[in-house]
Image (cartoon, rainbow, N blue to C red):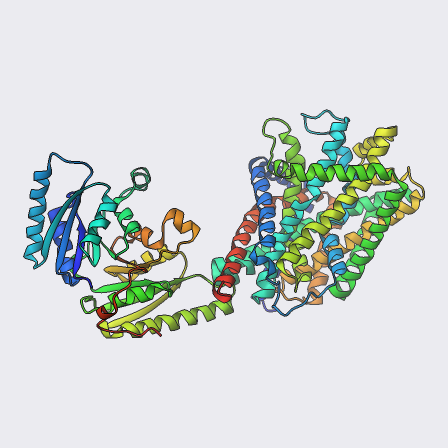
Amino acid sequence: MLQRAAVKISLKESRKRLAELFDFLANFGTREIHLIHVLPKISTQQEDIEEKLEKISKDAGYLGLRVQTHIRCGHVPVIVNEVAEETKADYTALCWISRSLFRTAMFGHTESDILRLSNIPVFIFNPGLFKSANGFEQVMYATDLKDSDAAVLPYLVDRRFTAKKLYILHVGERAPDPDTDEIRRKRVLDSLHGLARACSHAYDTVQPVETIGSVNRQIVKQAAMHGVDLIVVGKSERLDTVSQVVGSTAELLPHRAGRSVFIIPVICKLPAQENRQGYHLQ
Amino acid sequence: MNLKGNIVFVISLLAILVVILAGILSSEALDRGSAWLHTEIISNFGWFYLVATFLFLVFSLYMALSRYGHVKLGMDHEKPRFSYFGWASMLFAAGMGIGLIFWSVAEPMIHYMSPPGYIEAGTPEAARFAMLHSFFHWGVHPWAVYIVMSLCIAYFSFRRGMPPLISSCFYPLIGKRIYGFPGYCIDVMAVFATVFGIVTSLGLGAMQINSGLASILPFEAGLFSTLIIIAVISVIFMGSSIIGVDKGMQIMSKTNIMLAVLLLLFMLLTGPTTMILNVFISTVSDYITALFNISLTTHPFTGQQWTQDWTLFYWAWWISWSPFVGLFIASISRGRTIREFISGALLVPTLLTFVWFSVFGGAAFSLELGSSAGIAAAVAQDVSTGLFHLYSFYPFSEFLTMLTVVLLVIFFVTSADAATFVLSMMTSRGKADPPVGKKIIWGSTVAATAAILLVAGGLEGLQRMAIAAALPFSAIMLLMCFCLFRGLRYEFRYERNE
């Protein structure tokens, strides 16, 4: 299920960074990648672009990946998602490019738009400054304990997902009084332990983490506190009014996470036969 | 005495004694300091008071009309402890009462004679403005302020099982820190506002009772007679407070409302009935039409000083009174639904207030405009004599004055009784039946402070301090709205699965 990736290439990425991405993807269990470069208009530098893509393809090929390149014209986020669908990619991968709030507000954020429009999982590669780029030791799954679990868990327990430690985080809302809050906390911990049991066979350690507060802020804080390499979240299509305006948790998270994020849309259901490991939700 | 359990009691009592000592030793300094603080706050944050009060009104209406309206302030099976009549009487007695009697003639007359610069004084337009703004200052806005405070306390106390304290409302925001320093700060501030408010009311109100009595009884109104009035009132309200809300407060409030309605009917029937009804209908119409407009107008180009002196002063005053009135109203509203509570608290007292202002203000205008009775001039000379001057044009004027003094005393006692009860509750970690010892301590503190400051001067300084407390409280109340919304949203989202 993570075998085929659509990779958005802007050609602004350094070769080193792309090599790190491909290395990471290979460790992710990916075997085939589609490099997508979108031109805003017909460019006179098409040959130059093809040449650069060729070099990138070779780099990926050295890692044992099968590579195809696609050069298209149009609106970048739409085209990337279209090609990903055409090629039946299991997920889209991209290098995260941080931009200032002002620049994002004025000119938009292509990566963010790809994520918003995507109906398949999106892997955002952002290893940070001092992290090893070619694998992940610790993963954090931020669950809402709702419908995202059914979509995300098959990925977490997949044998290609080779992390050693999994944190399962739930950021809740404090109940209006201490007694109810204690009951809420207990219920959340029970659910998290249930999820932990469902994932326990795939990791050396699975640790439930329960906290309250602003969801985005807490995910970032807990991820930093535990030094995780990858954050996994589900993306719901059912958004409240505020999220519709400012963006959902999944859409906002990459801007603040400072590390790689894997976002799985809830609507992206895994075919039954793919669920090789099997899991049980309590 | 367990210090941790009484930390709010000890801190607030000590701090209040320090401020009062400052008032006694250097009343001029307190006066100057409080005047500066008051002016700065009203000038710079007046707009904030307007916005906050308007938001409280919008929030109250939203709560009443939204799906949260049918949530009960208590467990689902609970029924209201007091009858509608008893509840409405106590609402009115604690929330308005004495101020309404004091200002029912004086305020329309003052606005008539001294309107803002863009209206000519003593004209029909000024009369219309005067009635509209009297309605505005005593209408739905003060009740929206009280509703926000009491709704939050009632929800978190009776439905979520927390102690009936203002700090309890902040659990969704700061969690168990409400049992620590932030919670203590909020409760101590509430005690401050309540003590300062009730002390100044007791002092200034005693002066008004004194002048009313002096106009019908053969004695000279002076400091000594005022002190005697304070002593008598204090004994009555402390006695009523010790008896408890069920008996003392409820009986007195019901008696008072019945006396007030009798007085109202007498004035309506013996006075210019048609004029009063016309004033009522047209001012209600003006009020409804202009509600949004006047709610958020600071008159930045002309008449800003008038807005600061009146509207903003009132808003700050209502907010500074809200901890005590809110806590009291919450404690008598257990078992009512949010919709029932808001519609009752917003409409019943407001309607009675409008009728009251129309009857007394309309009667005063009828005499003033028809035969230049000199009521406005009398009010200009001494605000507290306006109502008694009006009575001199009516039959049984001495009886009416006596009845009004009785009303003033009972309203005073009910307010002070409610304040003593609330202060004791706030300083006993929200015990529904606070210890008698604390009631006596707070009752004595309030009475002694009012008497001492009356002798030494500094009552107005203390009143301004109470109003200054309204600034942090308006921010606290906005946060309370947020906490209540979060609490209800949690209930609907996770407990009712809606």
- Is residue B296 among the parts visible in the rendering? yes
Reply above or below: B374 against B444: above
Q: Where is residue B457? Give x, y as percent.
A: 72, 43
Judge by depth and name the residue closer to the eye, B201 or B326.
B326
What quarter of the picture does the N terminus of chain B occupy? bottom right
Judge by depth and name the residue closer to the eye, B481 or B44.
B481
How many numbered marks are there? 0
A219 sits left or right of B303 in the view: left
Q: Where is residue A275? Give x, y as percent.
A: 24, 70
Reply above or below: A148 against B265: below
Judge by depth and name the residue closer to the eye, B321 or B131.
B131
- Is residue B26 among the parts visible in the rendering? no
Residue B354: quadrant of the picture: top right
Q: Where is residue B392? Give x, y as percent.
A: 91, 38
Residue B168: quadrant of the picture: bottom right
B194 sits left or right of B48 in the view: right
Q: Where is residue B141? Give x, y as percent.
A: 65, 45
Reply above or below: A133 against A47: below
